[in-house]
Each structure stands twice: as structure tokens, then as C-alpha cells.
Image (spheres, rainbow, N blue to C red):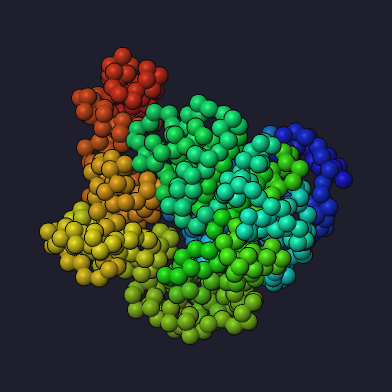
Amino acid sequence: MKIGDLGYPAEFLELFEGKDFNLYPHQEEAIRRFQEGNNVVVSVPTAAGKSLVAYSAIYETFKRGLRSIYIVPLKALASEKYSELSRLEKIGIKVALSIGDYDKSPSFIKNYDVIVCTSEKADSLLHHDPAIADELGLVVADEVHLLGDEGRGPKLEMVISTIKYVNPGIRIVALSATISNIAEVADWLGSSIVNSDFRPVPLKPGIIYRKKIVNMDGEEEKLKGEDEVIEIVNSHLAKGGQTLIFVNSRKRSEDYAKRIALAIDQNLIMKNIDFFPEKGETDRYEETLKSMVQNGVSFHHAGLSSETRTRIEKGFKDGLLKVLVATPTLAAGVNLPARVVLIRDLTRYSNGYSQFLPNMEIQQMLGRAGRPQYDSEGYAYLYAASKTSFDMAKTYLSTDPEPVKSGIFQDSLLRFNVLGIISMGIATSKEGIMDFFSNTFAGKTQKMVEEKKIEGILDFLHENEFIKNTMGIYSVTQFGKTVSDLYIDPKTALILRDYFNKKHSEILALYTICTTPDVLNFRANREEAEGIMEYFMNNNIILETEEEVCSGKTAMVLMDWINEVPMNRISEKYNIGPGDIQAKVSSCDWISYSLARISSMYKAEIRRDLENLNYRIKEGVREEIIALTMIAGIGRVRARRLFASGLKTVEEVSKSTPELISLIPGFSTRLAQETIKNSRRIAGRISA
């Protein structure tokens, strides 16, 4: 059966570059079952065409006049999926991407047929208005095996549970990698299972051990080179194949990439690669990467800035880079296949000792091997440094990943979710809340809901004025509603509320933000601790515990950031990556926004100051150039250059000339023209 046989408009094929092709058996079965009225869980390996099933279901739902929500685990994946689904607009299906602020009203949903979002964003939309669940005809849960992920799983579980609870007739398509308890997931979702081990590109697994590649059938291939990994890289490179290598730390990724860059066969590499056009701020990794990419090699980890990571990913996708050495975070992110995937490290340090990686994580990495439409087979290698590692590698290759288990009853998540349930009006009594949780994945698989925990959470929320209790019926206070809408941990809200009992100062506000459970702080070593404690003592803040010192370090990073210290200098000063700074700015941006929102209830006179502080955290600027950064295309570096050249207000920029502005470093004539045009759009609004 071909896609064209489904009876969809020709434009539907735009999702697949306009080509008609035969469906795989599992695709045909899943589509048929959905058309027959069943919910479907599709459990197949990576790159086996799961998305087609979802796209078909979206079109079927659109034909019924109903909306779909497409839930993915990461913003990068949401953007990727949105880009694909936007092609459906040719047949009248309007698609929206929703990954922004958590307190945005969900009213925009009525203007679209498909909403693509992360689990967190979907959950926040429901917090604002659970009735949007009634607007939906279909939920697509991508990567549903991540229900077992400690960080992302509980959010996905709550979203699906809430939508099902509010709208029991909702249709569900869940897309999953292979997991051992897929039947439990399907039972919870009320879905039929479409299971297959089919891969469009066959996988050739092997274990690198003692100068040999050991295949699963026991066959051995001897390796002659001094370094087995480099020999494999060069061997596949000679045949036009790219290699993706996973290691267990940032330092390892950098060191290993340097080593490979020096040993790679230079005759097979395209030279004069430029990934680093002129931009506002330099990256501490940039010089190292510039020389490395000329050898067709790069590293990839979360310490790199988001812009640099994007350039590297594109370079690998476009075939300019031949070898990428990455930490496992890449496997959970963008779709980046390679002919060869090699897991160099099977362990990582956790809680002070070395542990083998979960099988699920290993399979996610190995699943990247083999590029559909390009490779006839993919090569998946595990490197075993010892007999113990060799035995574990055999286990990885011969068994299914661990069963998915719920983490929804963690204390921090439970207090957050119970407040959300009451705020949404989904359940307003202890019995109703218990009933809700009995219908979650945890409730279905653990067969019991932790009543004592829920009672304790209700007492906590009541004692701290998040909720009211009227004869056993719970409702939110204004404070509780605000906190639920802001989508923050109630304990974070208490810390923010307590701030209004203190004398406001910039550093105290930053430190307070960094003491909340919603902010994961930078670690501080002993050498740093003394200087951090002294800095805060000089600001009348006493730090006593290791945790407080770490919060202090993060606050100092933010203080440098909002005072326009160059990112490179912050990176070197605190021994952190540009990506770490960006990630921290993102989380602290939202908490500082929440602090400003809550201030209107307790200390309205400082709200303006806190709003300015929030903007400064978001943009990394001093107060004097806030307005300049409101001009489209102008970040903190160019805004400071405009200010230093004498153009200190938006109005002054709007009255300037391209000839004058193009003399400022970083401004081409075209950018100068755009800057003037954009400044004129907002000059009147700001002056008003």
C-alpha cells in the first residue's frame, strides 16, 4: 500500500518531499487501526517512520473538524516538527508552535488546527484553562517512552492524564521506542499496540574489545591500528560515512575530538569550512573549534552556546563535518543520524561513583546509526574497556530497555500538580484528587495512590495560603492561582513571597531567585567559596552552607551578565560554558518574571524595578540600553555600540542615517538600514 492510496490530497505528500512510496507494514497497520476508531501506540525503532502515523491521524482529525496537539519533549524537536507540519498549510491545516512563556493565555488555540508544543508548555496551557482539552480531538505523544525519564516524564504523564480526565473521548496516538512494558503504557492509554523491530536501514551491531570487533553471532574482525576508534572512523570515512561518537563528559568530548582531528585522514576532508561568521560575542570554544572543523571534526555538548550547537548540527547534517564527538544529551535532542554510531563510554559518574548507563539511553544513541535514504546499513558499536564492560555490552545488545516507571509522586512534583489540579477545578476534594491520580500511569501501574503524601501536600498548601478548605472542598487563593498560572514550584513561590519582607536590592533579588528549587545552581569549589562568601558579606548577606554558596555563585554570574560583562569573560571567570550561562539566564528569567508578578500582591512599589531587572536578565544589559535592545535585531553588544557612538535612545537611532550607523563595528549598510526602519516602528510607542 502506498501513501497515495490513503485518499489524501496530493499536497499531503509535501510532508515527504512530494514523493509517493510504499508504507511499511507497521505504518499500514497503525493507520488502519486509527481509522477504525482505535487509539494507537506505535513501538518501533528510531527512524522507522513513526511520524507518518501521527501525520495521518492529524489529517483524519482535521477532516472531522477537530484540533490536534502534538507533544514533544524538547523545544528543538518542537521547532523541527513545526517546520515539517507547516507544509500542511497548503491543504488548509493551520499549524502553531507554542514553546514560549508559561503564563500565555491559551485562547490562541482556537485559531489553529494543530498545536506543536513541549510537555511543559502543554501543561501550562491546561493550568490556565483546562477546557482547552475539550477543543481537541487528538493528542500525539511523541517519544512516549520518556514517561520514565526523571525530568521530562512526569510532565508528559500529567498532560496526558489531565486531557484524558477532562475529555475521556480524546483520540491518542503515542509514538515510542522499544520498551519492555509497552503493554502497560498501552493499557493506560486505552490503546492498541503496533509493535515492530523493523528498521528501514538494517543495523549491524558490534562490540569493540581488545583490538577486535565482536559481532553478536560471535564472529570477530581484527583491528590493526594503534587506536581502534580512529581506525574505524577512517575506515568508514574512506567509504563516505560519518561517525557519531558518544562519550561521558564534556572534557572527554573536547579531548577526544582533538585527538581524532589530528589522526583523521586529511585526504578525505573538505577544507575551508566556516561555521563562525562575525557575531556580537565570541565563544570561549570558538578558536578550538575553528581549527578542528577544518579537519572535519567537532565536539558537541551543553556547554556550547545554542548558536554554536546549531551550526555544528547543521554542519554534520550537511556532510561538512565527518566526525562528531558528543555527550549523550545530543541523543535526546535533534534528529542527527550517522552511518556509524560508536559509544566510547558505557559508564558515567553519578553520586560519586561510576555507573553503567541505562539500556534505554544506550538504545537512544545506537538508534542514530544508519541514515534513511543514504545508507544501506548502519553500524552501531559499543566500546568495552574491560571484561565487565564487554559482558554489559552484550547485555545491552541482547535485551530490551528497562520498563518505564512513573516518577509523578516525587514530593516537588506532587505539590506542584496538586495545586494545579485544584486551580484548574479538575478536582476539589481529597477524594477527587485521589481519583485523578488513580488514572495516571502511576495509578494504573502501582495500583495504589499515596494517600498520606497527598494529605501532607494539601496541609502544606493550606497552611501556606495557596488554597482554602471549606468543609473538605478546596479552592485556590489569589496567591495560589497566580502561582499555578506562573507554573512554578509552590516552594519557589514561598521564597519569592518572603523576599518582600526584606529591603530590596539588586544583588539580594538575584540571590533570592537563585535559592529557589526551580533554579539548578552552578557548583562552587573550595577555592571559589571564600571569594563568593566575602562578596556577599560585603553586601550584608551571610552564606553559611554549601548550597547557599552555590546559589551565590549563580547570582554573581547573573550580576556580571546584567552588567554586560562579555560572555567569554564570564565563562572563563567562573569556568562555565556559554551554553550554561544561556540555560541559567533562561530559568532565572522566568523566576525573576514571577517575582515581579507576585510583587504586585505584596510590595507593588518595587514592581517596576523588578520588571526592569527581569528584562535585564533576559537581555543581559544595563538599564540605560534597555530601550535600544527593543529594536528588532539589536542584542546587547550592538546596543552598547550604538550607545557608545552617541545614539543613546531609540528616537536618536530613528533619526540617524545608514551612512553613520554603518561606521559602527558590527553594522553593515543593510543592517543599518534595517535598524533605522525597526527603530522608527517603536520610537513613538516608547516615547508615549
Give the side of residue 325 with respect to residue 240, left or right.
Answer: left
Residue 210 location, x and y as percent? 62, 59
Q: Residue at x 66, y 36 (%)?
A: 238
Can you tell which quarter of the image residue 643 is in? top left
For the N terminus, which image quadrant? top right
Q: Nearer the viewer, residue 146 or 384?
A: 384
Q: As drawn, is 73 to the left or to the right of 103? A: right
Residue 205 visible at all: no
Q: Position of residue 537 (x, y in %)?
A: 14, 62
* The one of 532 and 106 positioned closer to us in this rendering: 532
Residue in front for this viewpoint, 216 or 590: 216
- Rendered location of residue 512, percent (x, y): 26, 61
Taking depth in this image into account, of 158 and 203 the one nearest to the observer is 203
- Residue 9 position, x and y percent, is 78, 37
Q: Which of the 4 quarters of the picture holds residue 529? A: bottom left
Q: Residue at x 62, y 40 (%)?
A: 234
> In the image, is 549 to the left or to the right of 331?
left
Q: Identify the image quadrant of residue 374.
A: top right
Please say if 19 is above or below 450.
above
Quadrant position of the C terminus in the picture: top left
Above or below for 612 versus 683 = below
Note whether residue 474 is visible: yes
Q: Say which residue appears at 30% left-offset and 24% top-offset.
A: 665
